[in-house]
């Protein structure tokens, strides 16, 4: 990249991004191409724009908007690393997020089944995770 543009790529930021995109040379190349074509973009800006384009192509905004408030709250908890989704604190956060007085463990169970049936989440070693890590990053970035 430096030979083509005379601009350095920050190594730490590039490695963090590369790890976040599961070591995808395609994604890294897209960021470097964007930087070359848009000299005003630094690495972080280019990476953010590439992620945004990917989210749009994958339909993440539409998917997010079609989820119920409870399903969104459950996804947020999973993205934030919560493993005890029916704990008192998690239920309280989800009640606040859904603007309801109380969220029950039964409602969370139903939401998990719906999200699983729709191939949004699955269990790995008894922990709920998103099937598409990029969707998780999209959700994380919505609330960052």
Image: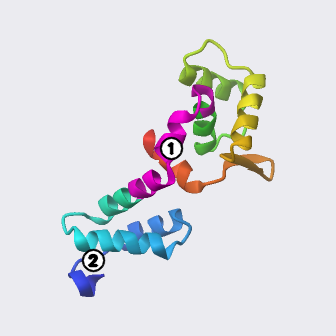
* Residue 92 pos. (x, y %): 63, 22
Can you say whether 88 is above or below 82 in the image? above
Q: Does residue 13 belong to the magenta stretch?
A: no
Residue 144 in view: no
* Residue 87 pos. (x, y %): 73, 28
What residue is pinned by disc 1?
139
Can you say whether 79 is above or below 12 in the image? above
Residue occupying the point 30% across, 81% down: 1
Judge left or right: residue 112 versus residue 96: right
Compute the Cα span from label 2 to label 1: 30 Å
Residue occupying the point 30% across, 69% down: 34
- The stretch in magenta equals 51-71
In the current view of this chain or complex, which residue is farthest to the right? 126
Give the quarter of the image for residue 11.
bottom left
* Residue 73 pos. (x, y %): 59, 31
Please tell me how crowded label 1 is: few (under 14), some (14-19), or many (20+) other residues with Cα within 10 Å: many
Q: Quadrant of the C terminus?
A: top left
Local secondary structure at mark 1: helix
Please tell me how crowded label 2 is: few (under 14), some (14-19), or many (20+) other residues with Cα within 10 Å: few
Mark number, residue 111: none
Residue occupying the point 62% across, 12% down: 101
Q: Does residue 63 belong to the magenta stretch?
A: yes
Nearest the eye: 38 or 15: 38
In the current view of this chain or complex, which residue is farthest to the bottom? 3
* Residue 141 pos. (x, y %): 44, 46
Nearest the eye: 92 or 136: 136
Residue 45 in view: yes
Residue occupying the point 54% across, 55% down: 134
Judge left or right: residue 80 versus residue 144: right
What residue is pinned by disc 2?
8
């Amino acid at each position: 990249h430096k030979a083509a543009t005379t601009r350095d790529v920050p190594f730490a930021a590039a490695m963090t991004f590369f790890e976040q995109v599961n070591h995808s040379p395609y994604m890294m190349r897209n960021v470097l191409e964007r930087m070359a074509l848009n000299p005003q973009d630094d690495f972080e800006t280019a990476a953010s724009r590439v992620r945004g384009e990917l989210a749009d192509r994958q339909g993440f905004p539409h998917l997010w908007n079609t989820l119920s408030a409870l399903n969104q709250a459950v996804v947020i908890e999973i993205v934030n690393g919560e493993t005890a989704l029916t704990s008192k604190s998690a239920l309280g956060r989800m009640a606040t997020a859904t603007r309801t007085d109380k969220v029950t463990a039964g409602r969370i169970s139903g939401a998990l089944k719906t999200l699983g049936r729709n191939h949004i989440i699955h269990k790995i070693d008894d922990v709920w995770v998103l099937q598409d890590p990029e969707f998780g990053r999209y959700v994380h970035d919505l609330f960052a």
